[in-house]
């Protein structure tokens, strides 16, 4: 995610500071980990400070190194969360203290979506439920791609650059 748009260039704030000062962060996303729900630089998110333990299907905002990450909570653990992006294939364990925000609403194209809407929650449940199937097809696709490359390499085909 980029720095907040409503802050002067001379005084860039971290998202955590904006959440504390304003009570919410509104801005664009960067990256593809939450596709198809959020498209980078097109959709706008509204994140509020985390005030309680997050629940499954909540979308947590946390820091990984110098990067902000917005991923879905699969389930809470005793000390944090198991989290995954909607377009990712690996789970991540995130400590409770690293999570500081939760997605409450977003603008997808021109549509305003509340994270409490039943249609949104159906989407979130379906994304989580279909993960094993998506992972299977992704792996199969990669194996086929690698096999085709091997056959083409065997017959001396070279990719043009």
Image (cartoon, rainbow, N blue to C red):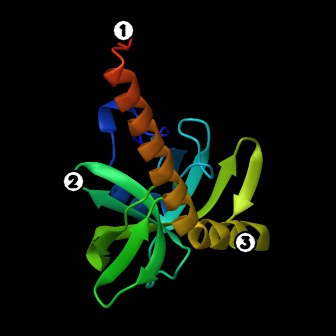
What is the CA distance from the residue labelled 2 to the residue labelled 3? Answer: 32 Å
* CB-based contact (under 8 Å), mark 2 and mark 3: no
Residue 86 seen = no
Question: Residue drawn 37% across and 78% down?
Answer: 81
Q: Mark 1 highlights which residue?
A: 161
- The quadrant of the picture occupied by the N terminus is top left
User: Badge 1 local density, few (<14 within 10 Å), some, or many (20+)?
Assistant: few
Q: Nearer the viewer, mark 1 or mark 3?
A: 1
Residue 85 seen = yes
What is the CA distance from the residue labelled 1 to the residue labelled 3? Answer: 44 Å
- The quadrant of the picture occupied by the C terminus is top left
Q: Nearer the viewer, mark 2 or mark 3?
A: 3
Q: Position of residue 76 (x, y in %)?
A: 41, 84
* CB-based contact (under 8 Å), mark 1 and mark 2: no
Q: Mark 2 highlights which residue?
A: 65
Q: Name the residue nearer the viewer: 126 or 2.
A: 126
What is the CA distance from the residue labelled 1 to the residue labelled 2? Answer: 35 Å
Looking at marks 1 and 3 on the same chain, the residue that comes earlier in the sequence is marked by 3
- Secondary element at image label 3: helix
Find residue 122 and name its label.
3
Question: Residue drawn 47% across and 73% down?
Answer: 73
User: Badge 3 local density, few (<14 within 10 Å), some, or many (20+)?
Assistant: few
Q: Nearer the viewer, mark 1 or mark 2?
A: 1
Q: Position of residue 56 (x, y in %)?
A: 52, 80
Given the current orientation, which residue lies at the most extreme left position?
65
- Secondary element at image label 1: loop
- Secondary element at image label 2: loop
Looking at marks 2 and 3 on the same chain, the residue that comes earlier in the sequence is marked by 2
User: Badge 2 local density, few (<14 within 10 Å), some, or many (20+)?
Assistant: few
In this rendering, position of residue 53 left or right of residue 65? right
Find residue 131 and name its label.
none
């Amino acid at each position: 995610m980029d720095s907040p748009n409503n802050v002067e260039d001379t005084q860039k704030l971290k998202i955590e500071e904006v959440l504390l000062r304003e009570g919410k962060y509104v801005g664009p996303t960067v990256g593809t980990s939450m596709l198809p729900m959020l498209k980078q630089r097109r959709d706008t998110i509204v994140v509020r400070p985390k005030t309680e333990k997050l629940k499954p299907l909540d979308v947590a905002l946390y820091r990984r190194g110098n990067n902000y990450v917005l991923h879905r909570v699969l389930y809470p653990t005793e000390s944090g969360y198991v989290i995954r992006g909607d377009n990712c294939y690996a789970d991540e364990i995130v400590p409770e203290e690293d999570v500081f925000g939760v997605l409450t609403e977003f603008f997808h194209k021109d549509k305003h979506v509340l994270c409490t809407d039943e249609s949104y929650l159906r989407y979130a449940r379906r994304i989580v439920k279909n993960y094993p199937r998506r992972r299977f097809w992704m792996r199969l696709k990669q194996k086929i791609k690698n096999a085709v490359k091997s056959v083409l390499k065997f017959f001396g085909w070279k990719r043009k650059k």
